[in-house]
Amino acid sequence: MAGIRQVLSTHCDARPARAVPELIVVHGISLPPGEYGGPWIEQFFTGNLSAQAHPYFKEIAGLKVSAHVLIGRSGTPVQFVPFGQRAWHAGVSSWRGRNACNDFSVGIELEGTDTDPYQAPQYETLAGLIEALCQAYTTLSYQAIVGHSDIAPGRKSDPGKSFNWPQLRRLLAAL
């Protein structure tokens, strides 16, 4: 994305042949859980998270996870993976009978938790990003936006009950 900070992750690879973005997956993440503003998410997505920095990190330090974009609490986006590549954000997942959602989706992480309200600037940035993605990829639409919990039910709960879907829909309708 032009105009936003890029911190490229190696936790990605090529999409399968003929696979294009058809789905936008909204996630929630905070590291350590419930804490905001540190360097930890960026370090996690780039494979540089020290297991010694926090007790929780011992559980996740070796994981290879990324997203296309992270939107911080202030609404500031950081891009980790180019949209034409496959980010490793969805894990074991299925949407409308299709498995392996990483193959055909864009993963957008919001800094937050299932229970803390997300911030207005995050929704504004998210809506603007979705609009730009839908303009860039005719295969994307406002009807193909889901939470991580929708494609991995029982395994994932994010973005959680605190995510205000009606607010996102209102912002998208106003664009």
Image (cartoon, rainbow, N blue to C red):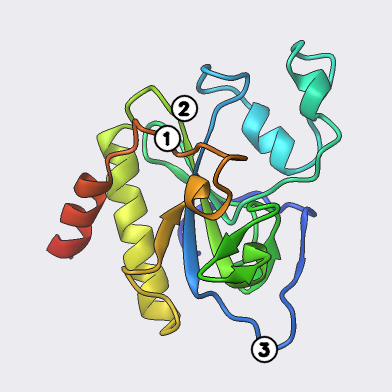
For the point 73% across and 16% down, the residue is 56
Which residue position holds label 1?
Answer: 160
Which residue position holds label 3?
Answer: 18
Which residue position holds label 2?
Answer: 113
Which mark sits nearer the N-terminus, 1 or 3?
3
Q: Is residue 9 above or below residue 13?
A: above
Residues at badges 2 and 1 in contact (C-beta under 8 Å)?
yes
165 or 155, nearer to the observer:
155
Q: Is residue 24 above or below residue 120?
A: below
Circle 3 packing at 10 Å, graded few (<14), some (14-19), many (20+), is few
Residues at badges 1 and 3 in contact (C-beta under 8 Å)?
no
Kind of residue indicated by mark 2: Thr
Circle 2 packing at 10 Å, graded few (<14), some (14-19), many (20+), is many
For the point 45% across and 29% down, the residue is 112
Say which of marks 2 and 1 sits in front.
1
Which mark sits nearer the N-terminus, 3 or 2?
3
SS for dot 2: loop
Give the side of residue 125 with respect to residue 72, left or right.
Answer: left
Kind of residue indicated by mark 1: Gly
SS for dot 3: loop
> Residue 62's spot in the image, x, y percent?
86, 34
